[in-house]
Amino acid sequence: MNISVLCKVVDNFGDIGVVWRMCRQLFLDYPDLKLHLIVDDLSSFNKIWPKVDVNKDFQAVDGIDVYRWEAADFCSKKFLEKDGEKLEIILETFQCGRPDWLEDILFQKKLKRTVHIIMIDYLTAEKYAEDFHCLQSLTRSAKVQKVNFMPGFTAKTGGLIIDREWKKLEEVNIKGPALVFTYEKNWAGLCRAIKKHNLKVKLAQGRGMDSFYSEYIKISDNIEKLPFLKQDEWDKVLKGSSVLFIRGEESLSRACLSGIPFVWHAYPQSDEYQLVKVNALLERIKNYFKPEDFLIVKNIWTDFNLPLEQISEEKMEKDADSFLDKREKLIYGFRAFAEDLRKNGDLCSNLMTFIQKFNIMDI
């Protein structure tokens, strides 16, 4: 039984972070599966999993075969073997498309077998995640069948990846540091609020690191620049924090499952579409809080995601101060949300149940 997974690294680590977590869990929970990961950026992959050799076209990493996306001749030869046996199921993640060599195999080489493409889309709380979940799409060949599989926050979606270390909801370390992992912005107001609450800061590598560090170091040296961490080490840092300021799909999903008070900085998009995504998730968590507590959460989330010219340092500081002041009292809402997410089931097991239900393969 074979599953091939396609991943293009768009935002440094988020894409490969989600995909690698999914592959690891599938490998552990379904030992009869043969997993083939095709990825375009081995350097970013290496940052979260140092066993990855950035110079190899092919390698086995913890039992999972890893192929370089651009190694066209090598991959074409390997994936044509045994009538495209490795292509029994393709997981196409985050609308990454397919390499040219794979397009040629699927639509020019005329495989005898039927190939099933399952589109694992971006995580969103928007309603379309439920509407598109398990919806079939057309391709150029009847032998290539495609269906959408949507991660999400409700039972009508595929859910979140809940790997073994995340099955249990742990207690929040209320004396832990603030973990900061954001995009670029004027963080002066946030820095002042964190300093006021005498929190140690653990600052993650990435695009937003310099813009935060340059402001915070002006007022405090109680800050630690984290090195690039293995995925499981990152999980430990996140779980040990008392409050999270995070970005990216991979860290967002972990924050949602942690029960720790968090603020999400969504990827800035044209026409301020990130606010649509942020407001959709706020609507999902709204009912877990008392109205006055939810307003505290909503205010700081909105500040993080408004365009720079629409948010003053003073308002950011005021709303961040309110959030940090109430963070321990807000745990109840974030924790209840995390508990309900676990009730939706794990994305990997939901995916394999879907595959079995529709007789795509025997498990």
Image: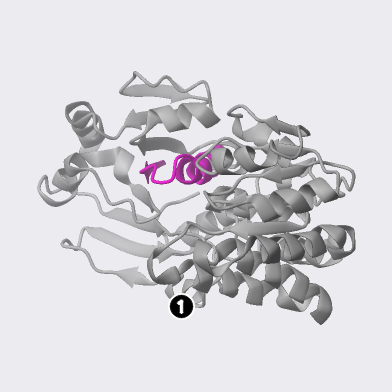
Q: Is residue 150 left or right of residue 87?
A: right
Q: Residue furthest left?
A: 108
Q: Residue furthest bottom?
A: 291
Q: Quadrant of residue 102?
A: top left
Q: How many callouts does the rendering have? A: 1
Q: Is residue 328 above or below residue 311?
A: above
Q: Quadrant of residue 279?
A: bottom right
Residue 30 can be seen, yes or no: no
Near-viewer residue (246 or 208): 208
Specify the quadrant that holds the N terminus.
top left
Q: What's the magenta region?
A: 1-24
Q: Residue at x 50, y 49 (%)?
A: 363
Q: Is residue 337 left or right of residue 5?
A: right
The crowding category of the residue bearing disc 1, from other C-alpha atoms within 10 Å (few below 14, some 14 to 19, many at least 20), is: few
Residue 164 can be seen, yes or no: yes
Q: Is residue 195 magenta?
A: no
Near-viewer residue (174 or 118): 174
Residue 23 point in image, percent of width and height: 51, 40
Q: How is the image coloured?
A: one colour
Q: Quadrant of residue 68?
A: top left
Residue 33 point in image, percent of width and height: 48, 39
Q: Is residue 172 above or below residue 134?
A: above
Tag 1 secondary structure: helix
Near-viewer residue (214 or 7): 214
Residue 107 point in image, percent of width and height: 14, 52
Q: Is residue 293 above or below residue 254?
A: below
Near-viewer residue (309 or 138): 309
Q: Residue at x 52, y 46 (%)?
A: 18
Amino acid on which disc 1 is placed = Asp
The residue under label 1 is 131
